[in-house]
Image (spheres, grey):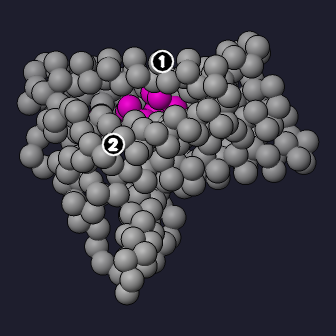
Amino acid sequence: MTRSDGWASRLAADIKTSILFCTRVPIPHSAPIEGGDVARASWALPVAGAVVGGAGALAYTMASAIRFPATLSAALALVATLLVTGCLHEDGLADTADGLGGGRDRPRKLEIMRDSRLGTFGACALMMSLLLRWAALAAMASPMTAAAALIAAHVSARAALPVFMHFVPAARFDGLSAHAGRPALRAAAVAALLGVLALAAALGPATAIIGLVLATCAGLLMAWLSMRQIGGQTGDVLGALEQIIEIVILLTAVAMSGRRL
């Protein structure tokens, strides 16, 4: 095998790992994914985001092509993304809201976040996440705008995860985030660059800058909150961060398109 063949194989393996980690797309894989594999492949998480966002964009475009109203097209786009991910990040958002909102101290908060049962805080967080994303998509100026915003939101939201994992330590020694490992700074930088490029290409430079600033603020707030309340990040916190940044980008796209929710 030549050096170029080895590089291409590693590139393909990282992309495959990122898609398997973030979605339920049935890609054949010869060996189980280890924690180190996820950390190494974390630079490709934006690629997985493009797969999810692309599914939503396709659903929205097809629904619009058969003249469904924007509200229904937006709902179908959300359904498509939920099916592709298996509600992975929504589950993290709900668990994080339940844990941070309902726990008295750090051990109790982490215990609640492990519990698969849905509490009041989690239910409300899920409802607000779905409602905000649906309303934002329904308010887009055109199907093409909605499709571009969907892809940009999903790519950039997942691009933030390796950066967050690199700078914010794991809150515990077991669990999804701890098992995934800490991404190298280079992997985090590549992911961030892919996220910025996706924002600029899909939404334009001005919207991309505003979205980047707001997403960075959201990430810093989540980092402060998770460090203060549970001493670091978990897989659930990462899921919550993905949802928050996704919402931020969609709302930014609507605001900059001149439409009102």
- Which mark lies nearer to you, 1 or 2? 2
Q: Which of marks 1 and 2 is nearer the N terminus?
A: 2
Q: Do the residues labelled 1 and 2 touch (CB within 8 Å)?
A: no
Task: Give coordinates of residue 78: x percent, y percent.
Answer: 62, 41
Q: What element carries label 2?
A: helix
Of 40 and 193, nearer the camera is: 193
Task: Give coordinates of residue 107: x percent, y percent.
Answer: 8, 30
Q: Which residue lies furthest to the bottom in this view?
A: 1
Of 177 and 85, nearer the camera is: 177
Of 86 and 176, nearer the camera is: 176
In the picture, the disc for residue 188 is 2
Task: Give coordinates of residue 154: x percent, y percent.
Answer: 54, 41
Res. 161 image quadrant: top left
Magenta residues?
237-246
Res. 220 image quadrant: top left
Quarter of the image with the C terminus in it: top right
Q: Residues within 10 Å of mark 2 (few under 14, many from 20)?
A: many
Amino acid type, callout 1: Leu
Q: Mark 1 points at which residue?
A: 214
Vertical placement of residue 86 versus 28, above or below:
above
Q: Residue at x 75, y 26 (%)?
A: 140
Q: Residues within 10 Å of mark 1 (few under 14, many from 20)?
A: some
Q: Residue at x 17, y 31 (%)?
A: 232
Q: How far apart are the two marked residues, 1 and 2, measured between alpha carbons?
A: 19 Å
Q: In this view, does 64 lie to the left or right of 188?
A: right
Instruction: State how many labels appear.
Output: 2
Quarter of the image with the N terminus in it: bottom left
- In the rendered image, residue 242 lying in the magenta stretch gets the answer yes
- In the rendered image, residue 194 lying in the magenta stretch gets the answer no
